[in-house]
Image: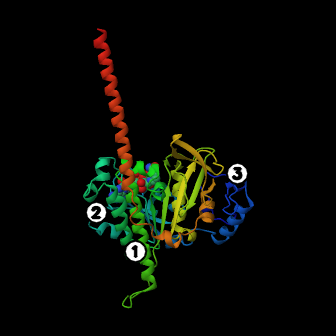
């Protein structure tokens, strides 16, 4: 592990000797206590020998961070700048305090560009991507209005409203990915979405977020799929280059999708751990520090094992011991929490770089393009009807109690 470059050392982690990793073995399904483990060390050692530095040529890199003035984005920009990589930040408002702070803090290594991924006119986005070797899409729709109308209206606000998740998280991502692939210089495109994008559409968190946040999970997943399709098209194009094309062949644009859990602004809480999963592994969406997410995104932009990978990053307040709590329902107990085994592919520890570099694997062939029409709406409708039924029952009960009280008072008078 000593071979790991200083650039890979995660912020806030202790000396190597004190690092502890929980490693779950798929073969045995046994869980090991929080102690330095031979199996984990073996994997770390073999990976670190291949990755003396995750950024092999900092001078040859220019990374576009869309949403770079945001809270994860600005941490990522600092991480990139610290590793000697030039950064271009795309923001809708280069005069904002956040954008000015970035420019002041990093000087010449960070340039600020204006653009909006929902603009129909692609001129600014094309200009922003020009010459970039990596693109990180670290933005998301911020909109909590008319959620029920959004969930059920067809055609709905997603057609026209530029703040709707359909416009930002889907069409914005699809547009940016296409422009990046067409640029002919972008080697990897990283998209930051959210943990519940990987959950089943019936998962309670996914259903609730869809209901109150304008179907945001549905559109985040559509955005991920658009990126995977664009990357797949780039791969096909590289295999069958046009006979009329001149100049050096364009690189294949790889993808990486990073799905964070609930984001925390402050540093990682003492005693807490980080969970890293990949592909379809189920990671509980616990709170995770934005610093850890930025570190994970940084690695996903460069590490060879993160090419065409989907990575989940979350946190746990205390080491889980491989057990997670999930909501369940049965006729006898109603809605309740039950303890269940963690997915054996999920790593838990305190060293994000170690876990990402040793644990993440590219998506399997069938994961590269996930189901295009995941049926989110029926589950959202079911929850809406359930809530409406509960509200009606409460209103009916309140009305009956009111009438009873009124009758009692009148009768007693
Ligand atoms: N909050 C959570 O708990 C949570 C959990 C999981 C995942 N996420 C996702 O993680 C990502 C980063 O989170 P964060 O905390 O860093 O969010 P943030 O601080 O709100 O930053 C998001 C950035 O997105 C940019 N943006 C929004 N609409 C845009 C548009 N149309 N065109 C270009 N840029 C646009 C904004 O940049 P400008 O204003 O500078 O243009 C903003 O700074 C988001 O995608 C979010 O959805 C959040």
Residue 181's mark? 1
Q: Position of residue 125 (x, y in %)?
A: 33, 67
Please give the name of the residue rendered at 54% of the width and 72% of the height, measured from the top-left corner: 57
**In whole angstroms, how far apart are the C-alphas of marks 3 and 1?**
43 Å
Foreground residue among 242 and 122: 242
Please give left or right for residue 214 compared with residue 240 in the image. Answer: left
Which quadrant, please, contains the N terminus?
Answer: bottom right
**SS of the residue at dot 1?**
helix
Please give the name of the residue rendered at 73% of the width and 53% of the height, measured from the top-left corner: 35
- Front of the two marks 3 and 1: 3
Give the mark nearest the N terminus, 1 or 2: 2
Please give left or right for residue 53 compared with residue 245 in the image. Answer: right
**SS of the residue at dot 3?**
loop
Q: Position of residue 243 (x, y in %)?
A: 39, 91
Foreground residue among 202 and 163: 202
- Front of the two marks 3 and 2: 3
Residue that badge 3 annotates: 34
Residue that badge 2 annotates: 119
Q: Does 257 sit above or below residue 104?
A: below
Residue 111 visible, this orientation? no
Foreground residue among 17 and 238: 238
Density class for disc 2 (Cα within 10 Å; few <14, some 14-19, many ≥20) is some
Give the mark nearest the N terminus, 3 or 1: 3
**Are dots 3 and 1 in contact, CB under 8 Å?**
no
Give the mark nearest the N terminus, 3 or 2: 3
**In whole angstroms, how far apart are the C-alphas of marks 1 and 2?**
18 Å
Q: Position of residue 314 (x, y in %)?
A: 54, 53
Please give left or right for residue 10 compared with residue 233 in the image. Answer: right
């Amino acid at each position: 592990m000593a071979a790991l470059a200083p650039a890979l050392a995660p912020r806030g982690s202790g000396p190597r000797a004190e690092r502890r990793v929980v490693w779950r073995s798929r073969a045995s399904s046994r869980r090991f206590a929080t102690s330095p483990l031979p199996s984990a060390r073996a994997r770390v050692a073999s990976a670190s020998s291949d990755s003396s530095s995750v950024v092999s040529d900092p001078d040859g890199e220019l990374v576009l961070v869309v949403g770079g003035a945001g809270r994860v984005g600005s941490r990522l920009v600092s991480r990139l700048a610290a590793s000697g990589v030039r950064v271009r930040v795309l923001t809708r408002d280069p005069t904002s305090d956040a954008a000015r702070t970035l420019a002041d803090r990093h000087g010449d290594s960070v340039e600020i560009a204006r653009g909006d991924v929902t603009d129909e006119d692609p001129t600014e986005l094309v200009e922003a991507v020009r010459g970039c070797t990596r693109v990180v899409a670290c933005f998301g729709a911020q909109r909590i209005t008319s959620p029920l109308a959004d969930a059920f209206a067809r055609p709905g606000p997603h057609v026209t409203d530029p703040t709707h998740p359909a416009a930002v998280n889907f069409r914005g991502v699809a547009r940016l990915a296409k422009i990046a692939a067409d640029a002919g210089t972008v080697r990897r495109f990283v998209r930051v979405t959210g943990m519940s994008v990987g959950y089943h559409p019936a998962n309670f968190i996914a259903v609730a977020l869809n209901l109150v946040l304008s179907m945001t999970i549905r559109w985040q997943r559509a955005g991920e799929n658009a990126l995977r399709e664009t990357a797949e098209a780039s791969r096909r194009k590289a295999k069958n280059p046009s006979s009329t094309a001149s100049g050096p062949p364009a690189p294949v644009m790889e993808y990486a999708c990073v799905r964070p859990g609930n984001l925390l602004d402050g540093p990682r809480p003492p005693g807490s751990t980080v969970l890293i999963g990949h592909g379809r592994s189920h990671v509980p969406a616990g709170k995770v520090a934005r610093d850890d997410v930025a570190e994970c995104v940084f690695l996903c932009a460069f590490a060879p094992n993160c090419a065409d990978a989907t990575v989940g990053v979350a946190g746990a307040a205390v080491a889980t011991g491989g057990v997670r709590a999930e909501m369940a329902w049965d006729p006898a107990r109603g809605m309740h929490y039950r303890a269940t085994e963690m997915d054996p592919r999920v790593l838990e520890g305190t060293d994000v770089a170690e876990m990402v570099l040793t644990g993440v694997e590219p998506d399997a062939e069938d994961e590269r393009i996930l189901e295009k029409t995941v049926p989110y709406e029926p589950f959202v409708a079911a929850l809406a009807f359930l809530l409406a039924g509960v509200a009606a029952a409460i209103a009916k009960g309140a009305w009956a109690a009111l009438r009873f009280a009124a009758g009692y008072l009148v009768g007693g008078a």
